[in-house]
Image: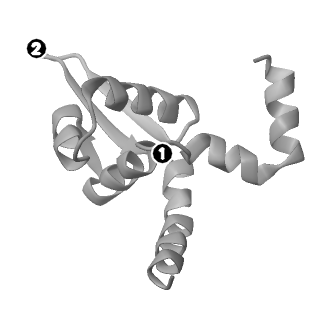
Amino acid sequence: MSNDKYMSKYDTCPLSAAIDVIGGKWRLPVIWAIHKNGVVRYNELKRQVEGITNMMLTQSLKELEGHGVVKRTQYAEIPPRVEYALSEKGEALIPTLKGLADWGKAL
C-alpha cells in the first residue's frame, strides 16, 4: 500500500486508523502487558500474554513498533538483551483502553 493511500485512508476515517493499529487478536493483550510491566523483555512478555505463539508475538511487536506504539531497545551485550516499552503514542492510548474496559464491564 502506498503512503498516499495510507494517509488518505486515515484522514477519511480516524476510527479506522485506530482499529488498524490496535485491531487483531493479540495487539491489545500485548499493549496491556507492556503497560502493566513498564519495560519488559520478550520471554516475560510471552509469559504474560497467555496462549500467544512466538510467531504471533514477534509479528505483533513488529507491527506495533511500525505504528510507533511500542519502542524496542536492543543492548549491545553478550548475550544480547532486548526490551520493549510503550512509546509516548502507546502511553497516550492507555486512558482510552481503560475507558473501553470500563464500558465493557458495564455491559
Q: Which mark is residue 78?
A: 2
Q: Left of 89 or right of it: where is 12? A: right
Nearer the N terminus, badge 2 or badge 1? 2
Q: Nearer the viewer, residue 94 or 39?
A: 94
For residue 14, above or below residue 6: below
Q: Nearer the viewer, residue 46 or 40?
A: 46
Tell me which amino acid carries mark 2. Answer: Ile
Tell me which amino acid carries mark 1. Answer: Ser
Q: Residue 28, position in %: x, y?
A: 44, 51
Coloring applied to the structure: one colour
Q: Nearer the viewer, residue 34 or 22?
A: 22
Q: Residue 88, position in %: x, y?
A: 52, 50
User: Within the image, what quadrant is residue 20 found in?
Assistant: top right
For residue 98, above or below residue 89: below
Q: CA distance from mark 2 to mark 1?
A: 26 Å
Q: Residue at x 80, y 41 (%)?
A: 10
Q: Residue at x 55, y 28 (%)?
A: 66
Disc 1: which residue? 87
Q: Which mark is residue 38?
A: none
Rate crowding at label 1 as few (under 14), some (14 to 19) or many (20 or more) other CA atoms within 10 Å.
some
Q: Residue 71, position in %: x, y?
A: 43, 36
Q: Left of 83 or right of it: where is 19? A: right
Q: Left of 71 or right of it: where is 67? A: right
